[in-house]
Image: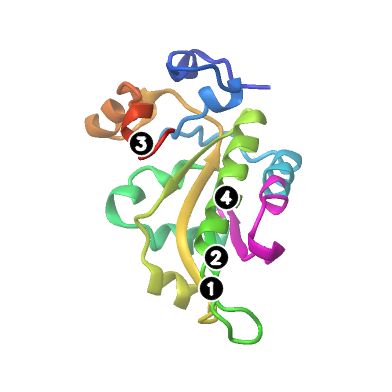
Amino acid sequence: MTNASPATSSRTAETSAPILEVLAERWSPRSYDTTVDIDEAKLTSVLEAARWSPSASNSQPWRFIVARRGSESFTKIHDNLMGFNQAWAGNAAVLIVALAETVDEDGKTRPWAEYDLGQASAHLSVQAHHEGLHIHQMGGIVVDGLRDAFNLPESLTPITAITLGTLAAPEELANDILREREVAPRERKSLDEILVVND
């Protein structure tokens, strides 16, 4: 199932080889419908997809703070987004903080924790799109602010924040810069540019 609204129909990636439809149609919007709350069954499926992603030695070093619009936790996350992200992220139905457990219970460093968290977040994003939802991952977060707001142990490091919700029209965004970014052509480096060796 994909969201086939006019707002997303022109966003399908022009790929150089066939890929799964859910991957070609996945993109990261900033315009969310503030009148639609999260479907809890869909949210559970999105988080379950993250839970079943691969990790080094099955260590599963991902953790998530999940906050629904209107909650105290949602406000805490929103307050710790860097300026430009605050202009639009508050319209999402859910804000998520993706955390990497970089140290295990014995105090041993987990060198692949951030990589594994990235895989879990990718699984989350694809499942979200399959469910007709959209996400946008943001690196612009105040790490120490999130640590303090949620009393996080040193073993957990906030890496990104994620918006999750139902797409709205670009015209709903607050300013011209945001609206322009919402409809700008999608671009990626070519395969030749990203393949260092391809024997």
Q: Which of these two is toward me, 118 or 64?
A: 118
Does 115 lie within the magenta span? no
35 in relation to 47, above or below: above
For marks 2 and 3, give the CA distance: 24 Å
Label 4 belongs to which residue? 119
For marks 3 and 1, give the CA distance: 28 Å
For marks 2 and 1, give the CA distance: 6 Å
Q: Nearer the viewer, mark 3 or mark 1?
A: 3
119 in relation to 1, above or below: below
In contact (CB < 8 Å): disc 2 and disc 1:
yes
In contact (CB < 8 Å): disc 2 and disc 3:
no
In contact (CB < 8 Å): disc 4 and disc 3:
no
Q: Looking at the rendered structure, which numbered label has been put on residue 194? A: 3
- Is 161 placed left or right of 193 in the picture? right
In contact (CB < 8 Å): disc 1 and disc 4:
no
Q: What amino acid type should be assigned to the residue bearing mark 2?
A: Ala
Q: Which of these two is toward me, 45 or 123?
A: 123
| Label 2 secondary element | helix
Q: Looking at the rendered structure, which numbered label has been put on residue 113? A: 2
Q: What amino acid type should be assigned to the residue bearing mark 3?
A: Ile
Q: Name the image quarter holding residue 165.
A: top right
Magenta-colored span: 49-70
Q: Nearer the viewer, mark 4 or mark 3?
A: 3
For marks 4 and 3, give the CA distance: 19 Å
Q: Residue at x 61, y 62 (%)?
A: 62
Q: Residue furthest left?
A: 176
Query: In the rendered view of the protein, which quadrant contains the C terminus?
Result: top left
